[in-house]
Image (spheres, helix red, strand yellow):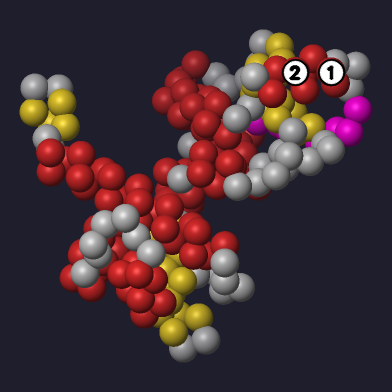
Amino acid sequence: MKKNGHFSKIGKYTVAATVEMLDFILKLAESTTLIGVTRKELYRIAQEGSEHDWSVANVCQTIHSLKKRGFVEIVNINGNQSIRYTNRGKLKMIQHISDRIEPSGLFLFVSFDIPENKNAGRNAFRRVVKRLGFIKAQNSLWVINKNVSDLVEMAAQEYGVAEYVVYIISDKTNINQLIIQQLEK
């Protein structure tokens, strides 16, 4: 897919289609009460409400690709095959998921002290924290005004650093105004 350090046109299309389909599944799942999205519903809505012309074959290929790459899984819910995110899929779409969560009156603080021998997990977890929208309050202390604690826990578990991560939810700090100003930037 990469050619001289750049994505080819096919590679760019594949990445765009993957993100669009994952985002599409996310939007559809939010509008339903089901844990996942049925395939039939996905086909119907993909053909009606997408920027791309999705044929049933395109949808099938993309879902197969997403499943093969570990972003979604096919499950049976009430006798229907449904598509839902895996943790890997949620991590891929974490910024989109976080953007849909409304700010609350509480602050979520995350602190982590991950050993050097877990460097890859530490870097991946830090990237997730940043993509969620956390700001750095102090060294090793990050804060956000949204309750994304379940996403933080999932990322910490997924990257094998959960035992080194702590979080606190608080409604009052001695730096409330500073945090609010930083989050509004």
| Magenta span of residues | 165-172
Dividing the picture into quadrants, the one containing residue 80 is bottom left
* x, y percent for residue 152: 62, 39
Can you give x and y, in whole percent of width and height, for residue 133 in the image? 60, 30
Residue 95 in view of the camera: yes
Judging from the image, what secondary structure is the residue with disc 2 in?
A: helix
| Residue lying at 50% horizontally and 59% vertically, measured from the top left | 27
The amino acid marked with disc number 1 is: Gln
Residue at 70% x, 44% y: name it: 102
Res. 70 in view: no
Q: Secondary structure at mark 1?
A: helix
Residue placed most toward the observer, 28 or 89: 28
Q: Is residue 110 left or right of residue 80?
A: right
Residue 140, picture quadrant:
top right
Determine which residue is flagged by label 1: 177
Left or right: 71 as drawn, with respect to 2: right
- Name the one closer to the observer, 20 or 37: 20
Q: Amino acid at mark 2?
A: Gln
**Marks 2 and 1 close (CB-CB < 8 Å):** yes
Residue 81 image point, x, y percent: 40, 80
* Residue at the farthest bottom position: 79
Residue topped by disc 2 = 181
Where the N terminus falls, by quadrant? top left
Identity of the residue drawn at 89% across and 22% down: 173
- Mostly what secondary structure, the magenta segment? strand
Q: Quadrant of the C terminus?
A: top right
Which disc, if any, is residue 89?
A: none
Question: Residue at left 43%, top 48%?
Answer: 88
Magenta run includes residue 171: yes
Q: Is residue 185 magenta?
A: no
